[in-house]
Amino acid sequence: MKQVNIGMVGYKFMGKAHSHAYRDLHMFFPKLAKPMMKLICGRDEQGVAEAAEQFGWDGYVTDWRELLERDDIDVIDINAPSNAHMEIALAAAKAGKHIFCEKPLALTLPDSREMLKAAEDAGVKHMVGFNYRFAPAVQLAKKLVDEGRLGEIYHFRAWFLQDWIVDPDFPLVWRLQKEIAGSGSHGDLGAHLIDLAHYLVGGMTEVIGMSETFVKERPLPTTMTGLSAKGSKDAPKAPVTVDDATLFMSRFENGALGSFEATRFAPGHRCTNSFEINGSKGSVKFDFERMNELQVYFSDDAEDVQGFRRVLATDPSHAYMDAWWPAGHTIGYEHTFIHEVVELMQAIEEDRQPVPNFVDGVKCQEVLEAVDRSIAERRWVRIDEV
């Protein structure tokens, strides 16, 4: 049984998700190489020590450079805030370590391209964390598109709606600061929609967009973890420097039209990550809040029974599901990360690049920045302009 030793930077929201995936992978996918949770890294020694104990890591460090000096570390997992991705990834590539990096890949397109080049020059494996690809229902949508069962694709529309910062007194967490996060709903939520569009439909040629920041300043936090934070509404305030909502339209290389909406100001929507694809022979609809289901419509059904049908993507015929529970027994958010690690372990064993990788991260960043340019210049922007 082969083992792959992991060193991870970050221990909060994504750190917990990735740790769970490494820990549980081999219980359900025993034939794969086993990820060994060697070292976890964080700047706060007390916090990272508690995380190492809670999540099941062998040990911890407070300086990520120590991970690169270890001969017994094969993969560097980067789930620290976005402004840390580039420096760690470049150093990891130089040290000959494989890299698993959360999205968005970097703060800017030039930085993401530099990360891709460094990984390619070093000949290491590189993966980017677009976990929603790995829901079995999304994999089923991909299968229906690729097999031509939806026919020629006309429309891709997607929306990612959340409401966790609607309260104007919610503290100024790092995700609302451009110098750390890169962008707001656009780069955090919209990046997932863009990757799903690339995965399911293909590349885009041009975009036009608009955005808004509804709450211009917020109180400074006292503590923050993941998407939660604590603070006083009477605390000093600082500017919000990212978008609260971004919408854009696109044209795809295959002639399809796209529309995208990402917002954190949609009350009642906790994590409505959804898409719909319309083709000449049928349509599919997906909503992550019902992640085990895909709504499917085929135009050639008899007229008296035409309509969207609910397909529960939990049978062994659906991607990854033969490793889980009996049909009808659903899986959850955390399983998308386990499926990511399945792909990473398989790629290392088979000596190929995992998918999605830094190439996909750069493609996503190109669209993000083309939309930003469109908003600034109030015009259609071609992807090849950025």
Image: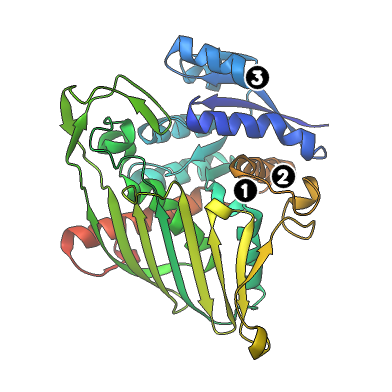
Q: How is the image coloured?
A: rainbow
Task: Name the mark on residue 354.
Answer: 1
The picture places residue 11, in percent across and down from the top left corner, at 50, 24
Instruction: Mark 3: give few (<14), some (14-19) or many (20+) Cα within 10 Å.
Output: some
Residue 339, by quadrant, is: top right
The picture places residue 45, in percent across and down from the top left corner, at 46, 10
Separation of disc 1 and disc 3 at Cα? 25 Å
Mark 3 in CB contact with mark 2 (< 8 angstroms):
no
Q: Earlier in the sequence, mark 3 or mark 2?
A: 3
The residue positioned farthest toward the bottom in the image shown: 303
- Determine the residue positioned at 61% across, 85% down: 299
> Is disc 1 placed on a helix, strand or loop?
loop
Q: Earlier in the sequence, mark 1 or mark 2?
A: 2
137 w.r.t. 126: above or below: below
Task: Name the mark on residue 346.
Answer: 2
Q: Quadrant of the C terminus?
A: bottom left
The picture places residue 13, in percent across and down from the top left corner, at 49, 31
Instruction: Mark 2: give few (<14), some (14-19) or many (20+) Cα within 10 Å.
Output: some
Mark 1 in CB contact with mark 2 (< 8 angstroms):
yes
**Seen in the image, is 266 located left or right of residue 34?**
left
Looking at the image, which is closer to me, 272 or 260? 272
The picture places residue 141, in percent across and down from the top left corner, at 61, 66
**Seen in the image, is 45 located left or right of residue 69?**
left
300 w.r.t. 48: above or below: below
- Determine the residue positioned at 38% across, 70% down: 205
Separation of disc 3 and disc 2 at Cα? 23 Å
Q: Label 3 amino acid? A: Gly
Task: Name the mark on residue 56.
Answer: 3
